[in-house]
Image (cartoon, rainbow, N blue to C red):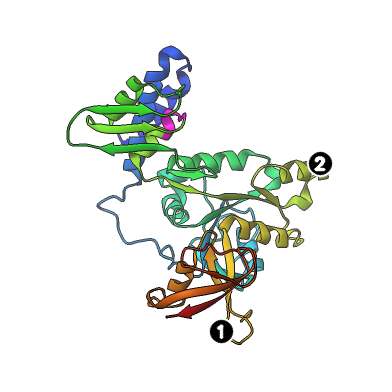
């Protein structure tokens, strides 16, 4: 029996098993087996031939955004509107067959946008180049899931399921569980909060499924067995996702209102160029980017050339971005902007910068 058949068998058994107190251990074990087979499926086969053309896109710019969705939802039209790259768009499915990169220039930042080929159901099993598409999506900072507003929620559920099965967790944070394998000493199990979903016996059963008999486990939050399995497997990617509903000009205003009020969702129309500026603004927030301007002594700040950093960047990060030796020659910095109590404020290397701050660095 191949891996795909085993996965199908386990999925059937999980759906057949009623969830109650008596079956929680059995379900936990099934989920552990399922995760194990899925991770085997994602490992590249030894006999794999040449890589698919157009999928090794070099990372460039200040951030990377992957554009995924089913065929014919308007991804290529969106790429052509947002960037200077022309991606072939047509009314038939699978127009885009390789990964096409473009660059969105916004607030002085270069955001790399990847138009990936349409995902179909079963992509995680490798159908329709799905595995390569998903591998590229894992390297992005944010995923834009392009959905057809006329199709309701079907597409969203199917895509979430495909991404979930390959270890991409959308709009979720990493479970707060400490896990460390040891050479001996058995299982050390502890928790700082009352646990309602993971008992010591279940944790032990899941670990045995992965042939782990000596480990330290500390739960710092009430996690599910699925989250614990994610921590053991360790190759999960947690990333923000923006659900973009295209073709809203073809549905009722009540439906537009319902979709627009869903969490992490934006409604647009590529055909009529509606709401694209709001989408860019939201994307900027999701990428957590900030602009920082530099100033030389006695001169006005240079607002034409911003340094793009991630939110939470310190003065030291800015020094490294300007020149790698600057931090070692650093004496102090003068900062103007919202991160200071007064302007200019004299700060050290650990000061956290904010959007549109101006910095002047004084060397020793």
Front position in the image: 212 or 97? 212
Residue at position x 47%, y 14% from top? 20
Q: Is residue 342 visible?
A: yes
Is residue 224 in the magenta section?
Answer: yes
Q: Residue furthest top?
A: 22
The magenta-colored residue range is 222-227
At which x and y percent is residue 107?
64, 70
Is residue 321 in the magenta section?
Answer: no
Which label's residue is closer to the chain start, 2 or 1?
A: 2
Front position in the image: 357 or 18? 357
Residue 8's quadrant in the figure? top left
- For disc 2, the neighbor class at 10 Å (few under 14, some 14 to 19, many from 20) is few
Q: Which mark is residue 346?
A: none
Instruction: Report whether 195 appears left or right of 343.
Output: left
Residue 355's quadrant in the figure? bottom right
Name the residue that disc number 1 marks: 296
Q: Residue furthest right?
A: 253
CA distance for labels 2 and 1: 54 Å
- For disc 1, the neighbor class at 10 Å (few under 14, some 14 to 19, many from 20) is few
């Amino acid at each position: 029996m191949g891996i795909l058949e085993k996965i199908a068998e386990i999925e059937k058994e999980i759906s057949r098993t009623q969830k109650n107190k008596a079956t929680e251990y059995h379900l936990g074990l099934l989920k552990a087996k399922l995760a194990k087979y899925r991770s085997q499926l994602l490992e590249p086969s030894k006999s794999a031939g040449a890589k698919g053309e157009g999928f090794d896109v070099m990372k460039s710019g200040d951030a990377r955004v992957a554009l995924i969705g089913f065929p014919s939802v308007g991804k290529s039209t969106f790429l052509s509107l947002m960037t200077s790259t022309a991606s072939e768009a047509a009314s038939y499915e699978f127009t885009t067959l390789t990964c096409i990169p473009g660059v969105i220039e916004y607030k002085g930042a270069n955001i790399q946008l990847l138009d990936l080929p349409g995902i179909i159901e079963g992509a995680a099993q490798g159908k329709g180049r799905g595995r390569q598409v998903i591998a590229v999506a894992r390297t992005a900072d944010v995923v834009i899931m392009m959905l057809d507003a006329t199709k309701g929620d079907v597409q969203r559920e199917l895509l979430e399921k495909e991404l979930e099965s390959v270890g991409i967790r959308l709009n979720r944070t990493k479970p707060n569980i400490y896990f460390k394998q040891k050479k001996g000493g058995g299982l050390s199990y502890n928790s700082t909060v009352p646990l309602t979903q993971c008992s010591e016996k279940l944790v032990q059963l899941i670990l045995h499924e992965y042939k782990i008999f000596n480990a330290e486990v500390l739960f710092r939050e009430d996690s599910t067995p699925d989250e614990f399995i994610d921590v053991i497997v360790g190759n999960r990617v947690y990333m923000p996702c923006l659900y973009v509903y295209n073709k809203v000009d073809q549905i009722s205003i009540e439906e537009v209102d319902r979709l627009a009020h869903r969490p992490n969702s934006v409604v647009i129309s590529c055909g009529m160029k509606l709401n694209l500026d709001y989408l860019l603004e939201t994307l900027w927030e999701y990428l957590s980017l900030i602009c920082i301007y530099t100033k030389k002594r006695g001169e006005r700040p240079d607002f034409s050339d911003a340094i793009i950093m991630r939110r939470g960047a310190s003065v030291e990060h800015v020094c490294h971005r300007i020149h790698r030796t600057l931090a070692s020659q650093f004496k102090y910095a003068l900062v103007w902007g919202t991160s200071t109590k007064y302007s200019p404020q004299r700060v050290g290397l650990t000061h956290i910068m904010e959007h549109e701050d101006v910095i002047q660095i004084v060397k020793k």
